[in-house]
Image (spheres, rainbow, N blue to C red):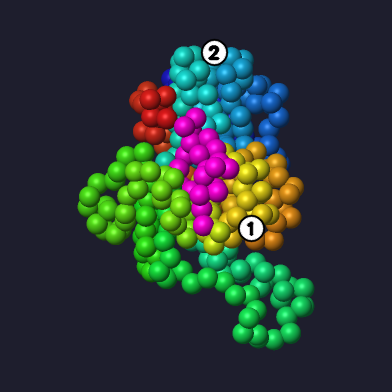
Amino acid sequence: MPSPRLSVVVTRRLPEPVETRMKELFDVRLRDPDTRMSREELAEAMQSADVLVPTITDQIDAALIGQAGDRLRLIANYGSGVDHIDVATARSRGILVSNTPGVVTEDTADMVMALIMAVTRRIPEGIASMAGGNWDGWSPMAFLGSRLAGKRLGILGMGRIGQAVARRAKVFGCQVHYHNRRRVRPEIEEELEATWWESLDQMLARMDIVSINCPHTPSTFHLLNARRLKLMKPSAVVVNASRGEVIDENALTRALRAGEIAGAGLDVYERGNQINPRLREVPNVVLLPHMGSATIEGRIEMGEKVLINIKTFADGHRPPDQVVPGML
């Protein structure tokens, strides 16, 4: 007699091919309409399912994990970052956690470059002028931005995404610099023509563009704080498509309003979708709705990784993308 299919609850809508395959393989409860689950709905799902498939919009903290039923054995996160999941508490309850690493590297690096171009070349201002019917013709002094070639780009976090950004920036003629917890291998530095800075403070003071590409951990929370923002050149810009908590958003807003830095491009925010209203009012900032990984190809690949993690677990093996506290 075949074993019963795993009960799986998915907290948000996923691409149609992924949902179809979920229905073929598991006893799955899909989310319709595509709205964020309440805390009560998450608790109910964790009490009734074998596997929960959450996203970054779901806060799976210790208290919620404490309410999980005996059936829950895997939290198969749809996404790479797991700072919204208390992995240590899950592990203590015998609940495995998996993620989808490596999928969004190229997509996010593309968005970093898009943000850099948008801020330095004032692209949103040009779009707004055309959309509003305010453009009355070319002028030598209109919409003046900055050339990328020759600029110093400082990458904060030289992991997969940081390196992908460096490859793109090198093609644009930027000088690549980076600060990382550990220096990357010499052959990577040589390929990227990248200069390592042991001191983040010293790097920030010399860069024209700073790209945040590190995860959110206790050690990176507000890594770019008011003191470090003051080290940057008044002509410098900062972009962030990584984690909003790495930048002190209030300090960034003050620096932008005071003209202490020239601009910012943000795809992530310190408090999720609760954006500082004063930040919205600053003219020299480009704000995007966390769309750095939003490609059809990437979303389907993420779903395929979730499927593999659950199927491998169902077959009695360790999910290939299992996350353990020591990795964080």
Q: Quadrant of the C terminus?
A: top left
Please state if 65 lies on the left or on the right of 211 as rendered.
right
Please state if 287 lies on the left or on the right of 296 as rendered.
right
Rendered view: 76 above or below 16:
above
Q: Quadrant of the N terminus?
A: top left
Residues 109 and 297: in front is: 109
Res 103 seen here:
no
| Position of residue 300 measured from the top left corner of the image (x, y, whole percent) | 49, 49
Which residue type carries mark 2?
Asp
Residues 98 and 237: in front is: 237
The residue lying at 70 percent from left, 56 percent from top is: 282
Task: Give the dominant element type of the magenta stretch: helix, strand or loop.
Answer: loop
Please state if 100 lies on the left or on the right of 263 as rendered.
left
Tag count in the figure?
2
Residue bearing the label numbered 1? 259
| Position of residue 29 measured from the top left corner of the image (x, y, whole percent) | 62, 32
Rendered image quadrant of residue 270: top right
What number is the disc on residue 312? none
Q: Please report the bounds of the magenta region as a residue range.
A: 212-233
Please state if 20 lies on the left or on the right of 287 as rendered.
left
Q: CA distance from mark 1 to mark 2?
A: 55 Å
